[in-house]
Image (cartoon, rainbow, N blue to C red):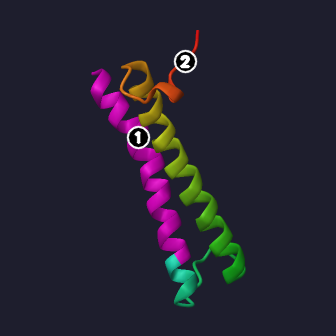
C-alpha cells in the first residue's frame, strides 16, 4: 500500500511536468490553448509547471536516498 501511495505522489507532479512541456512546445509551434490569453503567458505557465513538477520529483528521490544513506557524504545530514 505504501508503494502505491508513493507512486501516486510521484506521478501527479510528473504529469504536471509533462503538461508543462506540452504547453511550452505548443507555444513554440504557435498553438494557443484555451485558458491562456496569449502565447507568452502559456509558455511561462508551462515553464512553472515543468520546473515545479521536476523539482518535486527530484526532491522526493533525494529525500528517499538520503534516508537510506545512498548519497555522497556532502549531502548527508549532520545531526
Q: Which quarter of the figure is the C terminus placed in?
A: top right
Q: Is residue 64 magenta?
A: no
In which quadrant is the N terminus drawn?
top left
Q: Is residue 51 above or below residue 23?
A: above
Q: Main secondary structure of the magenta part?
A: helix
Q: Position of residue 53 (x, y in %)?
A: 52, 50
- Residue at position x 55%, y 86% in the image: 28
- Residue range of the region highlighted in magenta in the rendering: 1-24
Q: Position of residue 9 (x, y in %)?
A: 42, 36
Task: Tell me the residue that label 2 is attached to.
Answer: 77
Give the mark toward the camera: 1 or 2: 2
Q: Is residue 13 above or below residue 73?
A: below
Residue 14 falls inside the magenta stretch: yes
Q: Position of residue 15 (x, y in %)?
A: 43, 54
At 57% from the left edge and 78% from the top edge, which residue is drawn? 33
Q: Specify whether 58 is left or right of 38.
A: left
> Of label 1 and label 2, which has the lower sequence position?
1
Relative to residue 74, is residue 42 depicted above or below?
below
Quote the CA–CA distance across marks 1 and 2: 23 Å
How many residues crowd around disc 1 within 10 Å: few (fewer than 14), some, or many (20 or more)? some
Q: Nearer the viewer, residue 70 or 31?
A: 70
Mark sitting on residue 10: 1
Q: Is residue 72 left or right of residue 77?
A: left
Local secondary structure at mark 2: loop
Q: In the rendering, at what x and y percent does residue 12 appear? A: 44, 46
The one nearer the camera, 69 or 47, is: 69
SS of the residue under disc 1:
helix
Specify whether 54 is left or right of 39. Answer: left
Residue 77 vs 5, above or below: the answer is above
Amino acid at each position: 500500500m505504501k508503494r502505491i501511495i508513493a507512486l501516486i505522489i510521484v506521478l501527479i507532479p510528473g504529469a504536471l511536468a509533462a503538461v508543462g512541456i506540452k504547453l511550452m512546445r505548443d507555444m513554440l509551434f504557435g498553438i494557443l490553448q484555451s485558458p491562456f490569453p496569449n502565447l507568452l503567458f502559456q509558455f511561462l505557465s508551462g515553464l512553472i509547471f515543468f520546473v515545479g513538477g521536476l523539482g518535486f520529483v527530484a526532491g522526493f528521490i533525494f529525500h528517499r536516498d538520503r534516508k537510506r544513506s545512498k548519497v555522497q557524504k556532502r549531502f548527508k545530514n549532520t545531526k
